[in-house]
Every structure is written in C-alpha cells, then in structure tokens.
Amino acid sequence: MMLRQPLRYLHRFVKVQRQSAKQVDLLTTRVKQDAEAREIICRAANTDSSSSEMSPLETSEQSQSSGRGRTFWTIVATMVPVVVGVLGYEQLKRSGTATVTASLPQYAIEDVMQHNNTETGIWVTYGTDVYDITEFVDSHPGGDKILLAAGHSIEPFWDLYTVHHKGEVKEILDSMKIGQITLVDRMRLANRTKHDPYEKEPARAPVFRVNSLKPFDGEPLPHSLIKNFVTPNSHFYIRNHLPVPEINIDTYKLEIKIASKPAIVLSMEELRSKFKKHTVMATLQCAGNRRAEMSEHKNVSGSISGVASISNATWGGARLRDVLLYAGYTEDDAEVKHIHFEGLDNDIAKEPYIVSIPIEKAANPLGDVLLVYEMNGKELPRDHGYPLRVIVPGVIGARSVKWLGRILADSDETLSFWQTKDYKSSPPTPHTGCFDFRDAPPIYESPVNSVVCEPEPGEVLQPVDGEISVRGYAFSGGGNSILRVDVSADGGKTWHSADLHAQEQTPYRTWTWTLWEIKVPVLENSDKVEIMCKAIDSFHNVQPDSISGIWNLRGFLNNTWHRVNVSTTSNDNQ
C-alpha cells in the first residue's frame, strides 16, 4: 500500500513522454493540489519550494513547454528522490511520527550535532525527540561513555546495550526532553536502514534464563546448574559485554608487548606448539550474580541476574606466565605492575573490552592464569571466547577476557571504562552522584557465597519423616576452599551442616565450587518454610545475614544468606 501512490506518479511521468501537453498540465496540476505532499517532496529532493531553484515538477513544466523535453531515463532519475520522499512521508504518517507537537521547538539534525560538549550543552536524540543531557552526564551509571553519543542519536548505543530499553530508563530520558526533530529530518531518518550489531550472534541452546538478549547475558536454571560438578559447555552461563566477534582462525594473531620492549605476535599454531599445555579446573562467577535480590532491596544498575551466573569447567591452554617470559618479561622488571587484556569485541566507537590484573596474580606460578583454547576438552565455543581467552581463577569472571587479541605489560592498570568505572563496589549510598567510581579499587576476588538451588522459590514440598531435601553450591574466591555450609529451616533458630562434594585441590589454590546437600528438619504443622543457607571458607570468612550493609549501586557481590520460601504439605492434604 505504501508503494502504490509514489509508483503511480512515476508511472504517469513515464507515460507523459507520449502524451499531449494538455495531459502533462493536468498531471502537474493534480500533484500540486496536495500542498503538503509537494512541500515534503521538494525538500526530500533537496530543493526549497520558496527558492528560485526549480522543483522536479516545475522542471517538468519547462520540459513540456520546450518541446519533447527530457528523455525517459532523465525523468526516471529525476523522480527517484520524489519517490523516496513520498515513501518516507507515507512511512512517517503510518508510524505516527509525521505529527509535530506545536508546543515543542523543532531542531534540525545539524543543530543537534553542534551541541556536543559541556560549553554548548550536550544534546542527543532518541526517535524523533531531542534531549539535553548536560546535567545528567555526571550521574550516568555508565560513566562518560554516554558522551560518545553527544550531538547524535543514542539509539545505536541503546541497541548495543539493550538494558536501556526499560520504562524507568525512558522516563529519566523524557525528563530531559527539549524538542523534536524537524519533519524533513524525520522523513530522512524514516528511510534509514538500521544495522543490528548482534545479527551474527552464535546459536544458543534453549536452556538459559535470559537476563539480557543484547548483549547476551544468560544463566542456566538453578536445578540444572548443580546436576554436574563440571558444567557442560552448552549450559555454562554466558555474560557478554559486546557483540560476539567473528574471528578467522587462519589469520588470527595474538600480540604481546612487555612495557618498552618490542611487541611479539603469535598465531594459534605457535601458541599450541611453543608452550606446554596446562589444564586447570576453575569456577567462573559473574560479579553480578544474585543481583536480583539486591535490586529488591533498592534499585541497582545492570542486568538483573538470578542465582546461576556461575559455572565450573576444566580449561586447557598455555600458562600466561610462560608466554610473558617468552615475550621478554623478567621478574625483576620494576616497570611491569599490571597486565592488560584486550578483547577483539568492540563497541560502536571501536573501543574494545579491556581490563587488567596485577602482575602478582598474572605471573605467579601458583596463580594458574591460563591463555585458554580448550573448554572441557573441546575447542572453545564462540560465546566463551573462541579462539583464545584468559582464565583468571579465583577472580570475578569479568577479568577472564574472551576473544583475546592483545596483552600489554604496563606500569599502570588500564584506563578503560571497564576497569576504571565498572566492576567496582560503592558504599550503600542512595544516589549515583554521591560516588565517583574512579576513586574505588577494582573488584578481583569473589567473597564467600552459597545458594539454595533445590527447591526453588514457591515449590510445594512433602516432607519425609519431617525433613525436606535441600541442595546447592558454595564458592569462595582467591583460592579459598569451603569449610562448611549451614542450613536452617526455622528462621535461623537451629542450623544444620550440609554434606559437601568438592574436587580435591591444593590449599590456597582451590579454584572450584563445592556442591552440597542436606535433609533438614521442618517444624510440624508449618505450611510455610523459609530455607536459609550460609557458607564459611578456609579463611573463616562467613556470609553476612542482610543486604542493607552491602548494597551497592551496581549490585555487585551479593553474598548474603540465601533465602528460599516454599510451602509444605502432608499426605492428608493431598
């Protein structure tokens, strides 16, 4: 339907070449009668209806008066912008964006582009609206990354970080609305083809609770998470920060640069052949695991993860220490204090994902940091960093960079956004403007944690001999093992120690989780039960009992007692 009217005009213009001058006059008059369409068409063709420059219709009149006029193909070429203009206008009318709000100022795209710094004011567009975000920049949860959109549309960034597509985020943006884009620019935007940066994502098994689709953030269901001590690749939680890159293994190279020394480059074949393969079993846990519980206490920034953004695998590859030594690093090199890891995944501004870790962890022969090309004995899946990633055991998953492209040994930590303004914990302050993330130290090791995976919240259970079965996992970062997991089903009046199932590892190099299970007694004649668990690690660290003291703006490191509310029933009630 949208094509019918402009194509009808084009068809008539073609027939005009064989029609009389009178027929041309009738057609021209008919088109001109729609003043609104004529204005849009003239502007779309980069003409001004009030200027001395002739529109395509006026040019057609002149052609008619001068005889045979233009050739068939000249008229077709002339009508192309007309057709595009009408198409765009029809699309605007169908979408409702052709309506101008009279009470709001109208701005051309060129006007918005001039407001791209604090002196001119920082403006952005979203859809057909214009916003002044100058005062909001300092309190933006994502830091000054928002400045990448200064003077432009924020839609490509929201499409990259789709967590923004929430009602409350749009409400914040609407509070800064100052006007609308002009009708002409709206029409041009309507004809724009949008590119989806996530169109080449890998296929994924339908086993995840999806916390964010773009970038993908998914976790397995809690009951399936603990079925295996080693998590199958297809069920391993996925936390991507940017679109998954497509990497050609035949041309892939890893660059390693040690401070002021010349950089070296290694292919995957060289990494496999030059360095002994080591294997490490290690659990990775997202720093935002259990963020959903923290968000119930008070709003936090980030995708709302449940309790299963954690998994365990056996990783195979070269020791980072060996590769650093090969590239020229020496232990007495006072220049080197941090190791940067740069991924091949990029944002719209072509900025890659980069984080760093201290040299004390990176080069420690007991630190077990690997450059990994195998996961559970198989080639790394694309979602998990193919062809090469870093695994930093005992440290939050954000430091185990995927799709590794470059390693830099430097005197300072990287200044990337991900290192300086994310993956940091704030005090429990109420507003983002009260805290500067740049002043906080980065998060590395995970605190001790435990979670009930079975039963899940809301389940109805039938006690057997007055007991219910409870199963879950426990984990502590920094190489600490789990000493004990305590479980209560009577509000914490009594606690019972669970049976632990763990992989035997060297003390202070325990990189894996512990699975646990217990049959815990429940009170008689109680149809509502709150199950609670808490773990103690080998340093005798214990989980805190409430969120209020550890709540933070980004919702990181929630390791409070885990609580699951269930119902119980007896045989008589069934």
Image: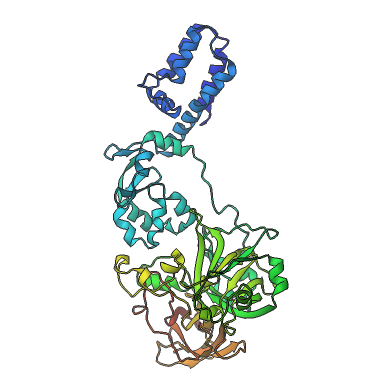
Tell me the quarter of the picture where residue 344 sits: bottom right
Q: Is residue 245 left or right of residue 100?
A: right
Tell me the quarter of the picture where residue 103 sits: top left
Q: Is residue 537 left or right of residue 262?
A: left
Which one is nearer the viewer's eye here, 459 or 10?
A: 10
Percent coordinates x, y for residue 416 in the rendering? 46, 64
In percent of the image, x 69 and y 66: which residue is there? Answer: 268
Above or below 485: residue 455: above
Display coloring:
rainbow
Percent coordinates x, y for residue 376 in the rendering? 67, 74
Which one is nearer the viewer's eye here, 166 or 421?
A: 421
Percent coordinates x, y for residue 349 in the rendering? 48, 53
Which one is nearer the viewer's eye here, 60 or 234?
A: 60
Q: Residue furthest left?
A: 103
Q: Answer yes or no: is residue 394 visible.
A: no
In percent of the image, x 41 and y 45: which residue is there? Answer: 127
Q: Answer yes or no: is residue 479 visible.
A: yes
Percent coordinates x, y for residue 350 in the rendering? 51, 55
